Image (cartoon, rainbow, N blue to C red):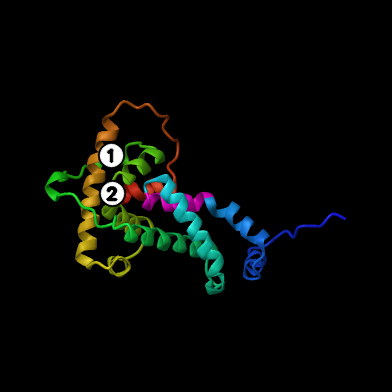
Amino acid sequence: MLRLIPFFTTEKQLIAALKRGEGRAHKVVYERFSGKMLAVCTRYCANRDDAEEVMLDGFMRVFEKIEQFREDGSFEGWIRRVMVTESLMFLRKNKQWRQEVPIEDVVVEPDYAWADTAVNENDLLRIVNQLPDGYRTVFNLYAIEGYSHAEIADMLGISEGTSKSQLSRARMLLQANLKKLEQEPKMHQQLGQHGYYEKTARKAAY
């Protein structure tokens, strides 16, 4: 006799199944959110293999801690916060987020008119990933995730001043690298519309 696999028609049903420990629910959650969550982890762990490892650890944490999810908020947002936390734990464990470069090496005058030129999202992600780990971490937490400098300082065990300094230097490097990229021959097809990450990162760089 054919056994019917339960189908989750609502997010509430899916979460309830997760809390019961149903493997089918684990699979559905992974298939539904893994693409987005890998993108989140990749913004912190520039190495793809590291990002995939962090993402898998993050999903394991989601399944283990699902009872902690308060269902009055966004489930995807909660998963995203778990992934950010796992990424920071990985960077802290490997002592990567403290990397810096001398400020005199990256000073550049902001060019606000140039900020509206077209650079596609893949190129923008690439140059963000080229930032030193400390700069990239603070930039992502502040500009993309929306944390305050006080929250970032608490998460990373640094001062608010250090967080602000890291963000300022990240912006300087981004401005310089974006300008270099725009001056290169365009070997890629420009996108007709910018995605959320592209628009947010570009705005935050200036």
Under mark 2, the amino acid is: Ala
Residue 66 percent across, percent down from the top left:
56, 69
Asked if the residue under mark 1 is in contact with the one under mark 2, i.e. CB atoms within 8 Å, the reply is: yes
- Identity of the residue drawn at 63% across and 56% down: 27
Magenta segment boundaries in residue numbering? 35-45
- Residue 166 among magenta residues: no
Task: Name the element at disc 2.
Answer: helix
Q: Which mark is residue 178?
A: 1
- Residue at 58% x, 55% y is 30
Q: Quadrant of residue 160?
A: bottom left
Instruction: Identify the residue shown where x is 64% and y is 67%.
Output: 21
- Describe residue 94's horizontal placement relative to residue 160 as left or right: right
Neighbour tally class for label 2: few under 14, some 14-19, many 20 plus, Cα within 10 Å: many
Instruction: Give the mark, 2 or 1, whose residue is nearer the N terminus.
Output: 1
Farthest right residue in view: 1
For residue 205, the mark is 2
**In the figure, is residue 183 to the left or right of 2?**
left
State the predominant SS element of the stretch in magenta: helix
Identify which amino acid the numbered label 1 is placed on. Answer: Leu
Q: Residue furthest front?
A: 94
Residue 15 placement (x, y as % from top left): 62, 67
Image location (x, y in percent) of residue 199 = 38, 47
Whether residue 38 is in magenta: the answer is: yes
Rate crowding at label 1 as few (under 14), some (14 to 19) or many (20 or more) other CA atoms within 10 Å: many
Q: Quadrant of the N terminus?
A: bottom right
How far is the residue under mark 2 from the one under mark 1?
9 Å
Q: Is residue 133 above or below residue 179?
A: below
Circle 1 — which element? helix
